[in-house]
Image: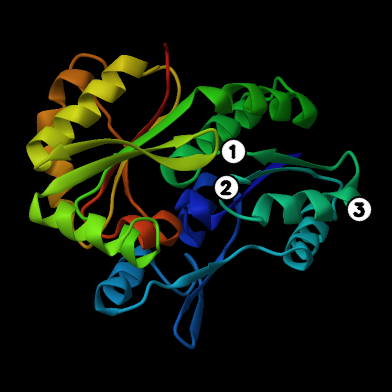
C-alpha cells in the first residue's frame, strides 16, 4: 500500500487529512510563550484570531528529523510505502529533515519537495492522491510524476495589507506606510520555491484585475487539481474575487474548491488575502 504524508503548510488540518485518506505532520507555531501544533490544537480560524490581536508575528518551527523518523516508523511498520510532500525547501528546513530521516527507510519512503506552500502544495497532494487511487504506478513512479508536474504549478495571490510583510521584515516601514496610504495591493507568487512580489495595484478592484490577468496568462489546466483560498476570519474578499473572475471559470467548471489559508503563509500576508493555485497550461 502507498501512503501520502504531508505537512500542515499545505493548509490541510488533521481532520481534513483523515477525510482525504492521507497522513499529516504539523509544523509548530509559537505566539509568545505559547506553542501550538498547526492544524491540531490551533485551527486556521484560531490562528487569525490570535494574529490580529498580536503585536509581534508568531514564529513557525520546521518539522525536525526526529519527528519524521517516528512518523516513518509508524507508517511503514506493515510494509507500506510512503510518499512525503513537503513545503518548499527554499522556505523551510522541513524538506531536508524529511530527506535525512528517510535514509533509514530505503525504498520505502520517497520525499517530494513541492517547491510550493499553501494551496500550491495542497493541489500537488490532491494530484498524488489521484495517482495512488488509480493504482497504475509504483511509489517511485508517482514520485517522479510529482517532481515533473510540480514545475507547472502556479500560486498567485493579492494581499489586502502590507502590515504583516513589514512586521516580518520583508519590506521597510516607510514602504509599508506609503503603500497603506495609497491603498496599494501587492500581488505575490511562488517562483522556483520562493515567495516573490510580482506586481502592485491601487485598490482591491485593480488588484483583482491584475490577478486575473496573471492567471489568464498562465492558463488553468482544468483536468488537474486547482483551488482558491482566502485569509482572515471571513470570506468577503473571496466572494468579491469570484465575482470579478467569473469569466475564468464560467463554462469550464461547476466546482471551485476554496479553503482558508493557514499559519505558514498567513503569518506573512495577514487577513484579506486571496490566492489562486493551479497547474498552468502555457
Q: Residue at x 41, y 40 (%)?
A: 196
Residue 11: image x %, image y %?
Answer: 44, 53
Disc 2 target residue: 87
Q: Is residue 3 left or right of residue 164?
A: right
Residue furthest front as drawn: 174
Task: Kindly indicate whether the residue at mark 3 contacts the one at mark 2 (C-beta within 8 angstroms).
Answer: no
Q: Quadrant of residue 213?
A: top left
- Taking depth in this image into account, of 171 and 62 the one nearest to the observer is 171
Disc 1 target residue: 114
Residue 262: image x %, image y %?
Answer: 39, 58
Kind of element beneath mark 3: helix
Asked if 21 appears above or below 192 in the picture, the reply is below
Q: Earlier in the sequence, mark 2 or mark 3?
A: 2
Disc 2 versus disc 1: distance between alpha carbons?
Answer: 6 Å
Kind of element beneath mark 2: loop
Looking at the rendered image, the disc whose residue lies closer to the viewer, 2 or 3, is 2
Q: Is residue 110 visible?
A: yes
Asked if 113 appears above or below 252 in the picture, the reply is below
Task: Kindly indicate whether the residue at mark 1 contacts the one at mark 2 (C-beta within 8 angstroms).
Answer: yes
Q: Earlier in the sequence, mark 3 or mark 1?
A: 3
Q: Is residue 219 visible?
A: no
Asked if 54 appears above or below 81 in the picture, the reply is below
Q: How would you rate the neighbour count of disc 1 (Cα within 10 Å): few for under 14, some for 14-19, many for 20 or more?
A: many
Q: In the rendered view of the protein, which quadrant contains the N terminus?
A: top right
Residue 155: image x %, image y %?
Answer: 40, 34
Disc 3 target residue: 104
Amino acid at each position: 500500500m502507498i501512503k501520502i504524508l504531508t505537512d500542515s503548510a499545505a493548509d490541510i488540518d488533521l481532520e481534513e487529512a483523515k477525510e482525504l485518506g492521507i497522513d499529516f505532520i504539523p509544523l509548530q507555531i509559537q505566539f509568545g510563550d505559547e506553542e501550538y501544533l498547526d492544524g491540531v490544537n490551533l485551527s486556521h480560524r484560531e490562528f487569525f484570531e490570535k494574529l490580529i490581536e498580536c503585536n509581534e508575528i508568531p514564529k513557525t518551527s520546521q518539522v525536525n528529523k526526529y519527528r519524521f523518523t517516528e512518523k516513518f516508523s509508524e507508517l511503514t511498520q506493515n510494509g507500506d510505502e510512503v510518499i512525503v510532500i513537503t513545503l518548499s525547501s527554499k522556505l523551510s528546513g522541513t524538506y531536508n529533515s524529511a530527506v535525512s530521516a528517510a535514509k533509514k527507510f530505503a525504498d520505502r519512503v520517497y520525499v517530494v519537495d513541492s517547491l510550493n506552500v499553501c494551496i500550491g502544495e495542497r493541489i500537488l497532494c490532491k494530484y498524488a492522491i489521484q495517482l495512488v487511487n488509480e493504482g497504475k504506478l509504483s511509489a517511485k513512479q508517482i514520485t517522479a510524476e510529482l517532481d515533473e508536474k510540480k514545475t507547472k504549478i502556479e500560486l498567485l495571490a493579492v494581499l489586502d495589507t502590507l502590515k504583516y510583510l513589514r512586521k516580518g521584515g520583508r519590506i521597510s516601514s516607510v514602504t509599508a506606510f506609503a503603500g497603506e496610504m495609497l491603498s496599494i495591493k501587492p500581488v505575490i507568487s511562488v517562483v522556483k520555491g520562493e515567495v516573490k512580489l510580482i506586481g502592485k495595484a491601487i485598490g482591491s478592484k485593480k488588484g483583482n484585475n491584475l490577478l486575473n490577468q496573471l492567471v489568464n496568462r498562465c492558463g488553468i489546466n482544468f483536468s488537474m487539481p486547482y483551488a482558491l483560498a482566502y485569509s482572515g476570519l471571513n470570506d468577503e474578499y473571496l466572494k468579491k474575487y469570484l465575482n470579478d473572475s467569473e469569466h475564468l471559470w464560467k463554462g469550464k467548471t461547476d466546482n471551485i474548491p476554496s479553503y482558508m489559508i493557514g499559519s505558514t503563509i498567513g503569518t506573512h500576508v495577514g487577513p484579506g488575502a486571496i490566492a489562486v493555485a493551479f497547474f498552468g497550461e502555457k
